[in-house]
């Protein structure tokens, strides 16, 4: 069973630049595409960013494009989400996701393994 543990959340002022981390275990890490999703209070979970197993391909939601950057370190089984220029509307629980690269499920679909989440609260 794949295990994912997120860290790096907390309370941040608008304009801040925190970095979220997700540590994966019990997985051949490079064989999994990794993603970040978020769920704001009263809203459905939504895709934020995704990265291929090799790290050579990334995808972003329009709402974060140009502000957030996803990256991964396959030697350490880590995936990161660098968030810049945070806005109050970025307040949410952020979840790490892992899915086998070979399955080719689009990021718009919930699929794969999930972490417990890390909360990010942006104050104006």
Image: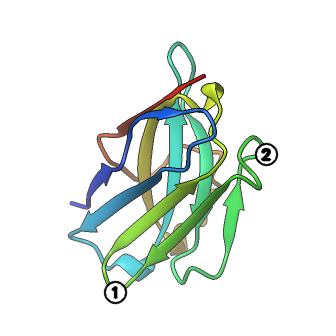
Q: Position of residue 110 (x, y in %)?
A: 52, 43
Residue at image coords 45%, 40%? 94
Q: Position of residue 95 (x, y in %)?
A: 42, 44
Looking at the image, the residue that sits furthest to the top is 42
Q: Nearer the viewer, residue 4 or 103?
A: 4
In this view, the residue in front, 59 or 7, is 7
Q: Give me the C-alpha separation between circle 2 and circle 1.
A: 29 Å
**How many C-alpha atoms fall within 10 Å of the one at disc 1: few (<14), some, or many (≥20)?**
few
Q: Position of residue 59 (x, y in %)?
A: 70, 61
Q: Is residue 35 toward the left or the right of residue 118 in the image?
A: right
Say which residue appears at 32% left-offset and 51% top-offset.
Answer: 6
Mark 2 / mark 1, whichever is N-terminal? 2
- The label shown at residue 75 is 1
**Could you say which quadrant of the image residue 90 lies in?**
top right
Quadrant containing the N terminus in the rendered view: bottom left
Residues 1 and 93: in front is: 93
Left or right of residue 78, residue 100 in this image: right
For the rendered model, the colour scheme is rainbow
Query: Please, is residue 38 above or below residue 99 in the view?
Result: above
Q: Nearer the viewer, residue 57 or 100?
A: 57
The total of numbered circles placed on residues is 2
- The dot on residue 40 is none
Which quarter of the image is occupied by the C terminus? top right
Rendered image quadrant of residue 104: bottom right
Relative vertical location of residue 111 with respect to residue 43 in this rendering, above or below: below
Tell me the crowding category of disc 2: few under 14, some 14 to 19, or many 20 or more residues within 10 angstroms, Cα based. Answer: few
Check disc 2 and report its element: helix, strand or loop.
Answer: loop
Q: Residue sitting at 38 percent across and 58 percent down? A: 21
Q: Secondary structure at mark 1?
A: loop
Q: Which residue is mark 2?
A: 62
From this view, report whether residue 53 is shown above or below residue 104.
below
């Amino acid at each position: 069973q794949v295990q994912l543990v997120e860290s790096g959340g907390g309370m941040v002022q608008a304009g801040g630049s925190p970095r979220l981390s997700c540590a994966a275990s019990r997985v051949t890490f490079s064989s999994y595409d990794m993603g970040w999703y978020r769920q704001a209070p009263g809203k459905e979970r939504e895709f934020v960013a995704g990265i291929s197993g090799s790290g050579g391909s990334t995808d972003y939601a329009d709402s974060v494009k140009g502000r957030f950057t996803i990256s991964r370190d396959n030697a350490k089984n880590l995936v990161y989400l660098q968030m810049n220029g945070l806005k109050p509307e970025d307040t949410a629980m952020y979840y790490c996701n892992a899915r086998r690269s070979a399955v080719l499920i689009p990021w718009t679909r919930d699929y794969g393994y999930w972490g417990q989440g890390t909360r990010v609260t942006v104050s104006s």
